[in-house]
Amino acid sequence: MAALDRRSDSDQQEKYRQDDFQHEGADESSTTALEHDPHWQKKLIRKVDRRLLPILGAIYSIALIDRINISAARVAGMEEDLELYIGQRYTIALLVFFIPYFIFELPSNIILRKVGSANWLSFIGFSWGVVMLGQGFIDAWESLT
C-alpha cells in the first residue's frame, strides 16, 4: 500500500492511459479507473480550491467593503453633501443599491457556470469597480439612486 502512495503523478497518468487503452473496446457506458480514483479526485479538488478560493475570498472581501462604504461615507459627510437627511433619501439609496445586488446574485452564479470562472470573475470585478468609482463622482442624491 505504501508503494502505491509513493507513485509519481507521471506513473499514475501512464497507468490511466494504459487502462483507457485496455478499455477502448469496452462499451461506451463503462467508466475508466480515472473517474473512480478517490486519491486523484481529492488531489484535483485541492488544486482547484488552491487556485479559486483566494480569488473568490478577495472578491467577497472587496464586495463587503463596498457594501459598508455607503455607511462610512454617510458618517464622513456624504449625508450633508447630498442632502440625504431629508425624508427617506438615505433609505431609498440603500434599497436601490442592495435589492438588485441580491436579485442578480443567483443569475450571476448561473452565468458563472456557462461562461467560466476566469472570464466571469474578471468581468464582474471590473464592472463592480467601475460602478463604485462612478458613485464617487456624484453630486446629487438622485444620481446615487
Image (spheres, rainbow, N blue to C red):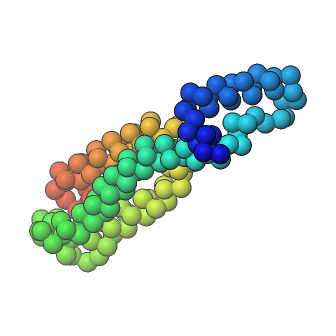
Can I make out residue 5 in this image? Answer: yes
Q: Residue furthest bottom?
A: 87
Q: Is residue 36 above or below residue 81?
A: above
* Image mark count: 0
Residue 24: name its quadrant.
top right
Front-most of 6 and 112? Answer: 6
The residue that appears at 84% across and 34% down in the rendered structure is: 29
95 left or right, relative to 106: left
Return the x and y of residue 90 as percentages of the image width and height. 27, 71
Front-most of 84 and 125? Answer: 125
Q: Is residue 24 above or below residue 69?
A: above
The residue that appears at 31% across and 73% down in the rendered structure is: 91
Can I make out residue 83 in this image? Answer: no
Return the x and y of residue 56 as percentages of the image width and height. 40, 50
Return the x and y of residue 4 as percentages of the image width and height. 62, 40
Residue 43: name its quadrant.
top right
6 left or right, relative to 78: right
Return the x and y of residue 80 as percentages of the image width and height. 12, 70
The residue that appears at 18% across and 65% down in the rendered structure is: 73
Q: Is residue 127 above or below residue 97?
A: above
Front-most of 24 and 79? Answer: 24
Instruction: Locate the C terminus by quadrant.
Output: bottom left
Instruction: Locate the N terminus by quadrant.
Output: top right
The residue that appears at 23% across and 48% down in the rendered structure is: 133
Residue 28: name its quadrant.
top right
29 left or right, relative to 53: right
